Image (tube, grey):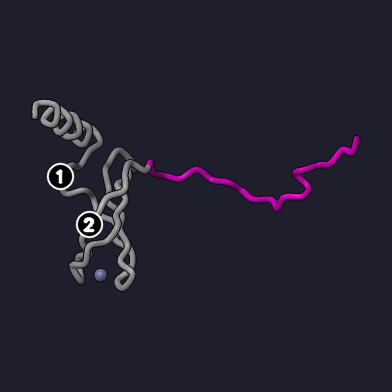
Amino acid sequence: MVNVNVSALRPQASKKDADYVFYELTRSICPVCRRVIDAHVVIRDNKVYMRKRCSDHGPFRKKCALCLSVGSFVRILFYNHAQRCLL
Ligand SMILES: [Zn+2]
């Protein structure tokens, strides 16, 4: 049996945790050209952000307009889910 040290074969990469939690992928509008673009809803430092990138105007990150804290965001999610269940 050949004993191979696998860690010696891999480049030493220091893996670092992201400083945010990805929640969902959605669509939004570029604030400059008003084109519809992909956006990520992320949670960071107990706040909800929308990250988006326009191919022409670069990245944007702003706090979600509807909710400033994760608690408010979760309450809105529960409200929306309850409304769907009533229909
Ligand atoms: Zn744009």
User: How packed is label 1: few (under 14 Cα within 10 Å), some, or many (20 or more)?
Assistant: few
Horizontal arrangement in the rendering, residue 50 relative to residue 84 (left or right): right
Q: Is 72 situated above or below 20?
A: above
Front: mark 2 or 1: 2
Q: Which residue is mark 2?
A: 28
Horizontal and vertical percent position of residue 15: 58, 46
Quarter containing the N terminus: top right
Q: Is residue 51 above or below residue 72?
A: below
Name which residue type carries label 1: Leu
Sooner in the amino-acid sequence: mark 2 or mark 1:
2
Position of residue 62 measured from the top left corner of the image (x, y, whole percent): 25, 54
Instruction: Identify the element where label 1 is drawn.
Output: loop
Q: Is residue 86 magenta?
A: no
Residue topped by disc 1: 66
**In the rendered picture of this protein, how many numbered marks are placed on residues?**
2
Q: Which image quadrant is residue 5 in? A: top right
State the CA–CA distance, disc 2 to disc 1: 14 Å
Residue 72 location, x and y as percent?
18, 34
Residue at (27, 61) in percent of width and height: 37
Q: In this rendering, would 64 be left or right of 10? A: left
Mark 2 within 8 Å of ligand 1, using the beta carbon: no
User: Do tag 2 and tag 1 residues touch (Cβ < 8 Å)?
Assistant: no
What is the magenta segment's predominant secondary structure?
loop
The residue sitting at 31% across, 54% down in the picture is 51
Q: Quadrant of residue 67?
A: top left
Could you say where residue 78 lies in the image, as x and y percent from the top left? 18, 29
- Please state the extent of the stretch shown in magenta in the rendering: 1-21
Residue farthest toward the right in the current orientation of the protein:
1
Describe residue 73's horizontal placement relative to residue 14 as left or right: left
